[in-house]
Amino acid sequence: MSKEDHLMWEKFREDPKNTLQPEDFELICKLHAKYFNHRYYKPCTCNPKEIKRWISQLNEYYLKE
């Protein structure tokens, strides 16, 4: 992860929450597309399973750094 992305993800992780703010959702989508090599898109918020999976994957990627 780039230093800037690492710091943004660190800040996101510092404040656990039950709901995502629009800027948090945007960050997750942007970083996941960048580091998991797919086009940028926003998953449907009607089913949070995919976004939760993305958060988990980004956490694993973050911890490997």
Image (cartoon, grey):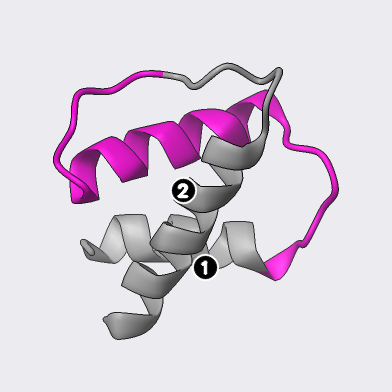
Residue 41 drawn above or below residue 63: above
Segment tinted magenta in the rendering = 14-41
User: Mark 1 to mark 2: distance in Å?
Assistant: 15 Å
Query: Circle 1 sits in a helix, a strand or a loop, which is it?
Result: helix
In the picture of the structure, the residue carrying the numbered disc 1 is 10
Residue 34 drawn above or below residue 2: above
Q: Nearer the viewer, residue 24 or 44?
A: 44
In the picture of the structure, the residue carrying the numbered disc 2 is 54
Q: Position of residue 40 (x, y in %)?
A: 28, 23
Residue at image location 27% in from the left, 81% down from the top: 65
Residue at image location 46% in from the left, 19% down from the top: 42
Q: Is residue 26 left or right of residue 61?
A: right
User: Quadrant of the rendered structure where residue 6 is?
Assistant: bottom left
Three-letter amino acid code at disc 2?
Trp
Q: Earlier in the sequence, mark 1 or mark 2?
A: 1
Residue 64 drawn above or below residue 39: below
Q: Is residue 15 left or right of residue 9?
A: right
Image quarter in which the N terminus is found: bottom left
Q: Position of residue 44 (x, y in %)?
A: 57, 16
